[in-house]
Image (cartoon, grey):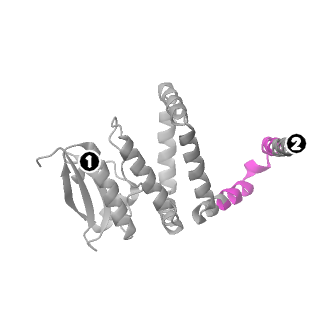
């Protein structure tokens, strides 16, 4: 391989269909380490073949090509083991403004389609097994036990929401998700799960709900006074 970076695909041996798109260096395309649960299940059951698509001089070019490939395959209902639209990964790498904009536009376009949003939500739900929840919980506990990590996250989030553009972008994303079929279904499920749990009937829970309702009425009265 003459160039350092490349993009690649993983193909199911039983159907010949692409189930994963990636980018990397060295032997990353052939490694089974650090792959998600769905990828592992497909490989264990059906086997896979690696195909290098393109070679690139820079990581930025590889990121751009990965985004393009995932977009192409997902539009055909493939690349099911890709849970993002590409452009993520490689610790320490900072995206150019062009790449950040490209990723953002691809995400907006992809999730504006309710069928796409629901399909991705269903894939994530199928992977969220009891074992996956346990592993995720243990991993989060270890990470958040590190005070330096907590401080870094505070700084990172503060910087991320320091501009009006970023705050508006996140607000639009949240609203779009809440209004989608997947978002409404997820919210309905969370509400039903909460009211069916013993925690919802505790004195503390009742107190918090009461305070929330009071704050809501206070806000409404303030807005009404401003209008008048």
Tell me how far mark 1 sits from mark 2, CA to CA: 55 Å
Magenta stretch: give its range: 188-212
- Image vertical order of residue 211 relative to residue 66, above or below: above
Instruction: Provide the secondary structure element on which disc 1 rests.
Output: helix
**For residue 191: magenta?**
yes
Is 199 situated left or right of 58 in this image? right
Q: Residue 225 got which mark?
A: 2
Task: Using the rendered image of the protein, determine whether residue 127 is visible from the camera's viewpoint.
Answer: no
Residue 120 seen in this snapshot: yes
The numbered mark at residue 61 is: 1
| Majority secondary structure in the magenta region | helix
Residue at 31% in and 48% down: 63
Q: Tell me which corner region of the image, top left, top right, bottom left or bottom right, holds residue 180.
A: bottom right
**Mark 1 surroundings: few (<14), some (14-19) or many (≥20) residues within 10 A:** some
Q: Which of 129 and 12 is in front in this view?
A: 12
Identified at 25% across, 70% down, the residue is 13
User: On screen, 183 above or below 115?
Assistant: above
């Amino acid at each position: 391989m003459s160039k350092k970076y490349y993009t690649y695909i993983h193909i199911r041996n039983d159907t010949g269909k692409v189930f994963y798109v990636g980018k990397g260096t060295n032997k990353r395309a052939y490694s089974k380490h650090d792959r998600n649960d769905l990828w592992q299940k497909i490989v264990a059951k059906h086997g896979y073949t690696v195909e290098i698509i393109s070679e690139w001089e820079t990581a930025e070019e590889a990121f751009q090509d990965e985004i393009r490939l995932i977009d192409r395959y997902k539009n055909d209902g493939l690349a099911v083991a890709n849970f993002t639209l590409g452009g993520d990964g490689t610790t320490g790498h900072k995206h150019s403004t062009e790449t950040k904009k490209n990723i953002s536009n691809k995400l907006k376009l992809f999730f504006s389609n309710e069928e796409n949003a629901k399909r991705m939500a269903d894939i994530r739900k199928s992977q969220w097994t009891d074992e996956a929840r346990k592993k995720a919980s243990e991993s989060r506990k270890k990470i958040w036990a590190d005070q330096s990590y907590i401080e870094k996250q505070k700084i990172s989030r503060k910087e991320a929401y320091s501009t009006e553009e970023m705050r508006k972008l996140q607000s639009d994303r949240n609203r779009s998700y809440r209004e989608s079929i997947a978002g409404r279904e997820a919210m309905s499920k969370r509400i039903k799960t909460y009211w069916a749990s013993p925690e919802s009937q505790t004195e503390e829970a009742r107190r918090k709900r009461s305070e929330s309702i009071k704050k809501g009425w206070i806000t409404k009265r303030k807005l009404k006074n401003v209008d008048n």
